Image (cartoon, rainbow, N blue to C red):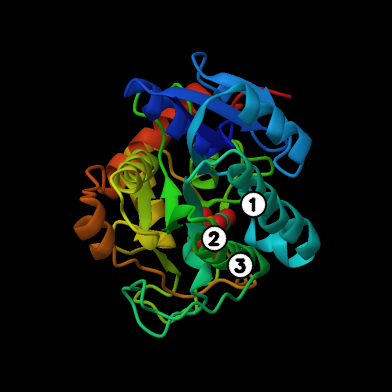
Amino acid sequence: MSILVLGGAGYIGSHAVYQLINQQNDVVVVDNLQTGHREAIHPEATFYKGDIRNIVFLRYVFKKESIDAVIHFAANSLVGESMKKPLAYFDNNVYGTQVILQAMTEFNVKHIVFSSTAAVYGNPAQVPIAETSDPNPTNTYGETKYIVEKMMYWMNQAHDIKYVSLRYFNVAGALHSGEIGEDHRPETHLIPIILQTALGQHDHITIFGEDYDTPDGSPIRDYIHVDDLIQAHLQALDYLQHGGASDVFNLGSSEGFSVKEMIKSARKVTGAPILVESGPRRDGDPSVLIASSDKAQKVLGWHPSRISIETIIKDAWNWHRTHPDGYGRE
Ligand code: UDP
């Protein structure tokens, strides 16, 4: 029996495949390679190139492989882009998941672990944010993920498909060995841009807003190591396989760091000066996002271990320093 990883060539999906294979699972990867990289796919995984929106293709994969459960990472995930191209996000994230659930129903696959996001909360009334906080997305990306959560809820009622939806905070870091890491094109995320600046690929990093209601004026986020994040997926799968009920969990470190604190820590790790400039706020950015991950710790038994911000930046640096062009020019 195999685990089907949708989006297994992407940043987070590729880390999931490595951990699953390290733990002796058979893994099937589906990816359309729109944003993922073929080089990121573990050589021992069975790979099918194709699009989740194509039911004929999905039926082919489900028929050929004996799929036990699905972990679904395949999505568009840039907040800014989602505001400019809402229909592309509804198409890939919402309709794409609808097609997956259709295939799961046809082939009687009953368990799915889904990548959701802290963006479902919008501007939370209170931090740390618990799962009981009302979702109120302020961008299209968060909205599409929230709609999928509701779709899975109704599919559970109708077809008994059990799901765990994991609401990620800011995922960062890389596999400790440095074999795989983060390579988005274009890159928009804070840590990769800081480290590219340390490598001399940009002359400075722009801080998007220094007038937030935070101690140093820059926004605060909760950064979680990708390895810890994936560990939670494996535990979620185990939870479902042992009869756990469908549920939603936050995944974060429960600690917040400002943009300026992140830059300071990266200077320490890299020894590079990392010049900064002050820029305007980025549309849709909340001031503070910090998770309460108590529920995942209690129910799934999840205990993140690489929570120091320096460890996260060190592992990311290990990747960027040894792969200055990411997976290479494509
Ligand atoms: N950020 C920044 N400069 C950059 C990229 C990001 O100041 O070049 C800030 C951004 O405003 C946010 C934080 O860094 O407060 C994390 O942004 P990222 O895009 O990594 O993740 P997000 O929180 O949007 O998911």
Quarter occupied by residue 291 = bottom left
Q: Residue furthest top?
A: 43
Q: Position of residue 268 (x, y in %)?
A: 32, 43
Q: Residue at x 64, y 33 (%)?
A: 36
Q: Position of residue 247 (x, y in %)?
A: 38, 62
Q: Residue furthest bottom?
A: 125
Question: Tag 3, which secondary structure?
Answer: helix
Camera-nearest label, 3 or 2: 2
- Give the Cα separation between the discs numbered 3 and 2: 9 Å
Mark 3 / mark 2, whichever is N-terminal: 3
Q: Which residue in the structure is indicated by mark 3? A: 147
329 to the left or right of 173: right
Mark 3 / mark 1, whichever is N-terminal: 1
- Give the Cα separation between the discs numbered 2 and 1: 9 Å
Question: Tag 1, which secondary structure?
Answer: helix
Are the residues flagged by discs 3 and 1 in contact, CB closer than 8 Å? no
Q: Which residue in the structure is indicated by mark 1? A: 97
Q: Residue at x 23, y 64 (%)?
A: 294
- Residue type indicated by callout 1: Thr
The N terminus is located in which quarter?
top left
Q: Residue at x 71, y 62 (%)?
A: 82
Q: Which residue in the structure is indicated by mark 2? A: 152
Are the residues flagged by discs 3 and 2 in contact, CB closer than 8 Å? no
- Give the Cα separation between the discs numbered 3 and 1: 10 Å
86 to the left or right of 25: right
Task: Using a 10 Å C-alpha cutoff, classify the residue at mark 3 as few (fewer than 14 neighbours), some (14 to 19) or many (20 or more).
Answer: some
- Residue type indicated by callout 3: Ile
**Taking the image as drawn, is residue 102 in sight?**
yes
Q: Position of residue 240 (x, y in %)?
A: 35, 48
